[in-house]
Amino acid sequence: MRNGNLTILAMIIISICTFNLPDAKAGIYPEDAGLVVYGDMQLTLFGGSIQGDLYVQDNGQITMNGGSVSGNANTSNNGQVTLVGGVINEHFYALNSSQLSMSSGSIGLDLYTRDCTQAIITGGSVDRHLKALDGSQVIMTGGSVDLSLYAGYSSNDSSILSLYGTNFAIDGNSVGPGQYFASDFSSGHITGTLMEGDLLDNDFQINGDSSIVLHTPEPCTIALLGLGGYYIIRRKKI
């Protein structure tokens, strides 16, 4: 299995599988405590569990329709992760120009996007914080975050967190669509209804030159949303 697609069927315990790819430029191999998917290899997980951490890197791709990762999930160097279901029990780290698409499933702790990563969240749950950092871009049209939303961390950060929905309010005061910087609201509490119908009810922080962009989309806009849609939310006041 040095290239092509690999499908793991339900209830296979991945941690006990053996993959011998010592010379492969693409493949899957077990770590001491987890699994690595790399180099154009594609993995689909329908069930079972990864005991330890999951790493998706160097153009590797994984789609989780079910199953679980007992530790952290990490994607980097153009890795792609699609969460359609399943559970990440600890943190999710999306780094180094990787891509995350999340429509269902859950992340047990924090979701970090960093280093020009792109992410789109249409459903599912993050059980602690969502942190868009280091020039990353995140679109959220649905799903839930239990605690806080962060746009940026340092003074030279320029991350963008875009929220699509209606009835937005900050600290109880109605706000319209637009791009909001730390000079507008460095922190506060934001409420609203996301496009997929989920309620938004979170503390937030904006740091550096980062921003939170609020969109109230027209129906035709919905069809355009996807990872390529980041180009429509560049540094432009709506």
Image (cartoon, helix red, strand yellow):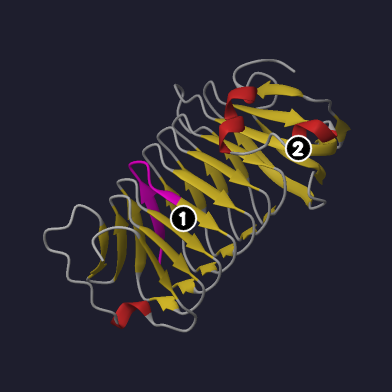
Disc 1 crowd rating (10 Å Cα; few below 14, some 14-19, many 20+) is: many
Front residue of 105 and 89 = 105
Residue of label 1: 92
Q: Residue at x 23, y 77 (%)?
A: 18
In this picture, residue 82 sits left or right of residue 236: left
Type of amino acid at the residue the image marks with label 1: Phe
Pinpoint residue 63: horizontal percent, then vertical percent: 49, 60
Helix or strand or loop: what does disc 2 sit on? helix
Q: Residue at x 77, y 47 (%)?
A: 200
CA–CA distance between discs 1 and 2? 26 Å
In this picture, residue 55 sits left or right of residue 89: left
Helix or strand or loop: what does disc 1 sit on? strand
Pinpoint residue 79: horizontal percent, then vertical percent: 38, 47
Residue of label 2: 222
The magenta segment:
71-80
Q: Residue furthest top?
A: 236
